[in-house]
């Protein structure tokens, strides 16, 4: 009888587990189905881009974007708080570029974020054209001093746009300092993009401590190619560059943080993230307004039913574009919780159709992710699971061993518009945005409700050293406040 009772108990337990697994899978499918029906992601994105617009960290639009995001979470009855972080303030000001020899020609340009300005009268100097650091060093100081260096380094497409971008963007970050060490008076780059109608692409530069700070700007692809052809033909093009860019003292910004508390393991945290800031020239529809509304919709969909096992924490980060202060500030504020962060996923690849997930985790992580996610995502056509990582904001979490992920999306045209004046709502196809939202929401549910978490990665650096003083919160994070509709506070 005891053996029979034990057998019956084991059978009942197995059946209960099977029923629970089926219920969990059903919930992921229902979340995805609702996302595919709902048009609210696009509606939210329209409000963000068309009423707030560009929202560079430290700008007047940044607090309006923060208030918008907070109100969106509150409307859905989700507890939300603002976590202060100091952000840089860079102001573009007036800028222009023109070729003055061998013939006058306006050039289409955008200053690079963080650049210093030129003297009020501008800089007029001959241009030397190189395609690499090696070519620059081969010229030597004699041929570079007093000149403007143009890095004509093309974006070479291999079919993996994100990896290709990583190679193409090299000279945007370090080119100005490399040129300045040899006496250059300014630095230009060929825009880091995949298409152009004389549309320049901005982005951040980084000044090295051991080099003079010289102005840096991006030229439209067509204009960079013109200067290259003139140089090859034996002409010495001369360019006038005028920039009134400046940096002001840091200001207080904020990460927008919202939570749905887990039903069984509320102390364990799954982060779903995007960055709220954008460059100052477009309205940030694909970079990263789309990611923000996907996160908002993910939280709405999960909040609409039973909570998953673990806590889901949404973070809309400040200052991804020109400083990563939001990502570092979040880690500094939540350092004691790092071992309880079981996963983080970021949406920062535009609004295209989602095809799968990139993962950086411990050994066997991709195989475990595939087994965990395939039932929920196969019907959405998102079946690619591979080694990779997450977005820039959650990179600091990955260095503490947290498994980090990025949504894989169709980025065929992403870099046509990325960081340009053309990053606007019309580039977003609503149905593709809905499908990507469905994938993100189902993936987050699966992570938060999984029986076992993904394997943690190795700690890559001293976590206590992460984040400079400027990345620390401006003040202690305030407790989460009840939502306007009276849903109880679900803050940490």
Image (cartoon, helix red, strand yellow):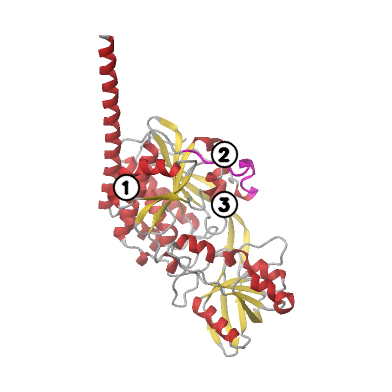
Residue 229 percent across, percent down from the top left: 55, 84
* Contact? badges 2 and 3 (CB < 8 Å): no
Element class at badge 1: helix
Residue drawn at 54 percent across, 50 percent down: 326
Q: Is residue 298 visible?
A: yes
Quarter in which the N terminus is drawn: top left
Residue at the spot of label 2 = 335
Distance from the alpha carbon under mark 2 to that under mark 3: 15 Å
Q: Earlier in the sequence, mark 1 or mark 3?
A: 3
Q: Is residue 422 above or below residue 89?
A: below
Q: Closer to the observer: label 1 or label 3? A: 1
Q: Does 325 lie within the magenta span?
A: no
Residue at the spot of label 3 = 325
Local packing at callout 1 (Cα closer than 10 Å; few below 14, some 14-19, many 20+) is many
- As drawn, is 239 to the left or to the right of 279? right
Q: Is residue 112 above or below residue 347?
A: below
In the image, which disc is placed on residue 377? Answer: 1
Q: Earlier in the sequence, mark 2 or mark 1?
A: 2
Image: magenta residue range: 455-469
Residue 106 percent across, percent down from the top left: 53, 83
Residue 264 percent across, percent down from the top left: 39, 29
Residue drawn at 51 percent across, 69 percent down: 192
């Amino acid at each position: 009888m005891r053996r029979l009772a034990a057998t019956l108990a084991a059978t009942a337990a197995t059946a209960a587990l099977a029923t629970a697994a089926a219920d969990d899978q059903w919930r992921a499918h229902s979340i995805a189905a609702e996302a595919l029906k709902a048009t609210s992601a696009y509606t939210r994105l329209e409000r963000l881009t068309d009423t707030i617009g560009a929202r560079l960290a430290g700008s007047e639009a940044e607090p309006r974007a923060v208030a918008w995001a907070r109100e969106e979470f509150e409307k859905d009855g989700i507890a939300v708080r603002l976590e202060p972080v100091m952000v840089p303030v860079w102001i573009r000001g007036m800028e222009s570029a023109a070729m003055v020899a061998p013939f006058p020609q306006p050039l289409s340009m955008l200053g690079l974020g963080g650049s210093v300005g030129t003297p009020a009268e501008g800089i007029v100097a001959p241009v030397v054209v190189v395609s690499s650091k090696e070519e620059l060093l081969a010229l030597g100081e004699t041929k570079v001093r007093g000149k403007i260096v143009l890095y004509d380094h093309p974006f070479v497409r291999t079919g993996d746009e994100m990896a290709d971008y990583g190679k193409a963007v090299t000279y945007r970050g370090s080119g100005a300092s490399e040129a300045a060490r040899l006496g250059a008076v300014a630095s230009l780059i060929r825009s880091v993009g995949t298409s152009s109608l004389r549309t320049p692409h901005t982005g951040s530069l980084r000044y090295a401590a051991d080099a003079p700070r010289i102005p840096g700007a991006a030229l439209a692809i067509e204009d960079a190619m013109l200067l290259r052809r003139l140089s090859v033909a034996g002409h010495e093009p001369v360019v006038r560059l005028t920039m009134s860019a400046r940096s002001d003292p840091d200001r207080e910004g904020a990460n927008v943080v919202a939570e749905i508390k887990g039903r069984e393991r509320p102390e364990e945290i799954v982060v779903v993230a995007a960055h709220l800031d954008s460059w100052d020239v477009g309205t940030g529809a694909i970079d990263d307004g789309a990611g923000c509304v996907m996160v908002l919709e993910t939280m709405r969909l999960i909040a609409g039913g039973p909570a998953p096992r673990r806590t889901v924490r949404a973070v809309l980060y400040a200052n991804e574009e020109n400083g990563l202060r939001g990502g570092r500030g979040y880690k500094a504020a939540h350092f004691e919780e790092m071992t309880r962060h079981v996963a983080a996923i970021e949406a920062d690849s535009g609004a295209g159709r989602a095809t799968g997930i990139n993962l950086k985790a411990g050994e066997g992580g991709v195989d475990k992710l595939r087994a965990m996610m395939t039932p929920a995502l196969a019907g959405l056509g998102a079946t690619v699971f591979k080694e990779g990582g997450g977005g820039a904001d959650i990179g600091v979490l990955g260095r503490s061993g947290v498994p980090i992920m990025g949504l894989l999306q169709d980025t065929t045209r992403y870099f046509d518009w990325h960081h340009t004046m053309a990053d606007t709502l019309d580039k977003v196809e609503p149905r593709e945005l809905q499908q990507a939202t469905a994938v993100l929401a189902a993936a987050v549910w699966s992570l938060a409700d999984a029986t076992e978490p993904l394997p943690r990665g190795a700690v890559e650096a001293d976590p206590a050293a992460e984040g400079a003083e400027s990345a620390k919160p401006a003040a202690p994070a305030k407790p989460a406040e009840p939502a306007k509709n009276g849903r109880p506070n679900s803050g940490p």
